[in-house]
Image: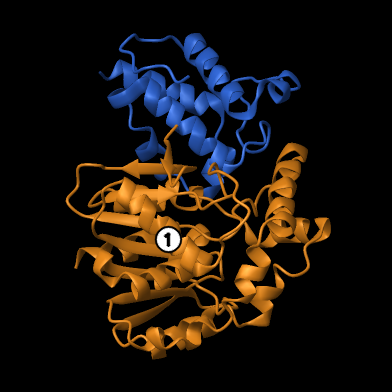
Amino acid sequence: MPVIQVNQREVHIQELNKGAAETVLLVHGMFSNLSVYYFNIAPVLAAHFHVVMYDLKSHGMSERVLEGYDLNSMTDDLCALMDVLKLKKVHLAGYSFGGLIALKMAMRFPEKLGKLVVIEAPDPNDEKTRGIIDDYSREFLEHYVANFTDTTKVKMGKRQMERNHRMYEYLFYQTSIKEDMILESGFFSTPEMNTLEKDTLLLYGSASNCLQAGKQLHKLISRSDLIPLNGDHNIPIQEPEMVANIVAGFFKN
Amino acid sequence: MDAIATNKQLNNDEIFDLMKQFITEVIGEEFVEEMDITPQSSFTKDLEMDSIEIVSFSEKIKTHFGEQIDFTGWLSAMDLDQLINLNLEMIINYIHECQLSR
């Protein structure tokens, strides 16, 4: 199992088609893991690109870490990972919280990026999206799992529920994730957002609560296209094939 | 530890035992002891494996069989419903077919 050391911490990564000339790096969202890409999206991209997926800290099979969930720290982590993997430049795609990480990368390290795909990144200033990390409870977890995760179609068993409950409790009560997210509430208003010059593709669900954030980003980023797809915040799970093909086409051209 | 890629052809019972070994490594012996793993066991419903655990399981298969099979490619052709209903027998048959066609 590919677990590598990045800044003395264990990071779980998965790679496909290592020999390819260009690399696509995929960033998952909060409370999720790289499996959101692994089964359907990554293999389509791997027909043309070297694909790298990784689990964010305390997510999936990466090491638990108490602090550093702000976008500066998350992009520091991503840069360190690129250094370890000897990747000088990548195309970057991020989903939800991972989309915010991707945007922050484009602001801080434009020289390390080719093109940018942002899928369903929320506006951190929106109370509804932030509210999700304000009032955690067991009931919340059950609701969250039933509505917002890739296990929507399966009733979660006892072992899974316990496992997820432990992860959520850790993230909510022991790490700085809540405080760090609140500090990011002005992210869309930072001046750097206006000067972002990457070719950017914004993919949003037409029925998603985050669509408004997509429209906002489209206005802010001069070289961006916004494509609304059928679905809600879960489009990578609802329409994996379509998402994969659109992203592959965008990175290829 | 993951086994290294091997060229030995396995029969269906041997593949099943190997799958059971991989599942035990992924979810832990204490949980496997409570379960009756059969070829009909489905990953998500019966074995209660979540997607990141299925990633680990897939990695073990890829490491063991190496170039012999394109496991990720095979999985990628499935939609979410098919992945949810995936059971051991389907994987055993797939590996068996790959071995025959070599």
Q: Residue most toward the left? A: A21
Q: Colour of chain B?
A: blue
- x%, y% of residue B30? 72, 22
Q: Looking at the image, which is closer to me, B98 or A243?
A: A243
- x%, y% of residue A25? 35, 56
**A63 with respect to A193 (left or right):** right
- x%, y% of residue A15? 34, 43
- Relative vertical location of residue A23 with respect to residue A198 in this rendering, above or below: above
**Disc 1 marks which amino acid?**
Asp
Q: What's the residue at 55%, 80% (across, down)? A: A123
Q: What's the residue at 74%, 37% (across, down)? A: A159
Q: Quadrant of residue A184?
A: bottom right
- Let me know if residue A155 appears in the view: no
**A210 with respect to B71 (left or right):** right
Q: Which chain is orange?
A: A
**A163 with respect to A238 (left or right):** right
**A9 with respect to A195 (left or right):** right
Q: Looking at the image, which is closer to me, A65 or B38?
A: A65
Chain designation of label 1: A
Residue topped by disc 1? A76
